[in-house]
Image (cartoon, rainbow, N blue to C red):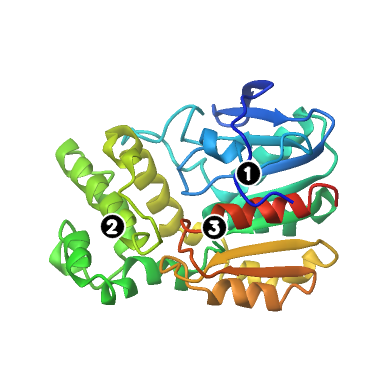
């Protein structure tokens, strides 16, 4: 069993999949064409897939499928423009996209893997289509709940008070005690480009702050790209202001639908962005799951990647 990232690989096949509402999704497959199929769902919403994500998967054992979700990465149209319609970018749409991709690639069942927001998406997909899921490997556990959203945008101000004051500074004074995500969504749709750009910069600075307790943290270079900042901020605030398009407690209440699906849940002890209690509650409601708490990791960093690779390696032939 490997305990580090696998060697860098290039896709052996890639393309674009036209889905609904004018969206075209970039997808790629790496590894062994006859290996165990595995789907990877990236974080964000809006992060897109990176070459590093390919290295979670043993190229000899897995046929890994990665794709950029609607509005980000190499998929089109991008969510960067204030006139980009986000009404067709919802969790339900992403569920349909995953099924279209599965059918396009001729896959009957697959392992499902995800990180952060990708965990929420993985769990929604598995609860909707349990017959399509062989096993799951999930890292930095989230469930898209209002409690998690409020924790990141408001409660964590107790840990980073100076940075939180900078985070809420663009929000009109009268709105600072209300829904900060919705307030930011409005700023990111403002007719004034300078207002939009400042909101995206402040949102991403806060994002970098609340992951900063992970071991080995350095500022993320991706936030230096103005287009990426705008895509990321718009998509996160869009999903979070709609509570990830989920009903309250949807994932925890639906855990019985995952009965019989083996899983490994990987979570960092020092993950301040997503405290350990979500992973704990999900694991307690999922007898077939195994929770791995990485003592030297946060929302990534430390031994997080190695633990996720080890989890996947253990599922390569479920």
Are circles 2 and 1 on residues that touch, CB within 8 Å? no
Question: Would you place residue 170 above or below residue 35 in this image?
Answer: below
Are circles 3 and 2 on residues that touch, CB within 8 Å? no
Name the residue that disc number 3 marks.
304
Q: Secondary structure at mark 1?
A: loop
Q: Earlier in the sequence, mark 3 or mark 2?
A: 2
Q: Which mark is residue 206?
A: 2
Q: CA distance from mark 1 to mark 3?
A: 11 Å
Residue at 29% in and 59% down: 209
Are circles 1 and 3 on residues that touch, CB within 8 Å? no
Please identify the quarter of the rendering in which residue 177 is found.
bottom left
Q: Earlier in the sequence, mark 2 or mark 1?
A: 1
Residue toward you, 152 or 182: 152
Q: Left of 100 or right of it: where is 89?
A: left
Number of callouts in the render? 3
Residue 192 visible somewhere in the drawing: yes
Please identify the quarter of the rendering in which residue 156 is found.
bottom left
Q: Position of residue 183 (x, y in %)?
A: 27, 58
Residue at 51% in and 35% down: 50
Q: Secondary structure at mark 3?
A: helix
Q: Position of residue 252 (x, y in %)?
A: 65, 72
Q: Position of residue 307 (x, y in %)?
A: 62, 57
Residue toward you, 17 or 287: 287
Name the residue that disc number 1 marks.
56
Q: Left of 81 or right of it: where is 95?
A: right
Q: Residues within 10 Å of mark 3 (few under 14, many from 20)?
A: many
Q: CA distance from mark 3 to mark 2?
A: 22 Å
Q: Earlier in the sequence, mark 1 or mark 3?
A: 1
Residue toward you, 266 or 235: 266
């Amino acid at each position: 069993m490997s305990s580090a990232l696998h060697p860098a690989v290039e896709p052996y096949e890639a393309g674009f999949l036209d889905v609904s509402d004018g969206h075209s999704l970039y997808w790629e497959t790496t590894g062994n064409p006859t290996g165990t199929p595995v789907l990877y769902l990236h974080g964000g919403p809006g992060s897109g897939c990176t070459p590093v994500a390919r290295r979670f998967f043993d190229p000899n054992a897995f046929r890994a499928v990665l794709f950029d979700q609607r509005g980000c990465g190499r998929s089109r149209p991008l969510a960067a423009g204030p006139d980009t319609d986000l009404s067709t970018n919802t969790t339900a749409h992403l569920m349909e996209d995953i099924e279209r991709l599965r059918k396009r690639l001729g896959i009957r069942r697959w392992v499902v893997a995800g990180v952060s927001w990708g965990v929420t998406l993985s769990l929604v997909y598995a609860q909707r289509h349990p017959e399509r899921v062989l096993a799951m490997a999930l890292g930095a556990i989230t469930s898209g709940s209002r409690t998690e959203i409020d924790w990141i945008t408001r409660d964590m101000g107790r840990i980073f008070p100076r940075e939180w004051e900078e985070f809420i500074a663009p929000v009109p004074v009268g709105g600072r005690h209300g829904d900060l995500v919705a307030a930011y969504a409005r700023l990111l749709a403002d007719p004034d480009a300078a207002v939009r750009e400042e909101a995206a910069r402040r949102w991403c600075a806060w994002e970098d702050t609340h992951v900063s307790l992970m071991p080995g943290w350095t500022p993320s270079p991706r936030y230096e790209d103005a287009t990426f900042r705008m895509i990321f901020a718009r998509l996160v605030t869009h999903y979070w202001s709609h509570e990830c398009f989920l009903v309250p407690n949807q994932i925890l209440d639906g855990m019985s639908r995952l009965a019989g699906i083996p899983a490994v849940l990987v979570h960092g002890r020092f993950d301040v962005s997503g405290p350990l209690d979500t992973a704990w509650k999900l694991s307690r409601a999922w007898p077939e799951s195994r929770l791995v708490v990485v003592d030297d990791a946060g929302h990534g960093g430390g031994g997080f990647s190695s633990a996720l690779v080890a989890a996947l390696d253990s599922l390569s032939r479920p």
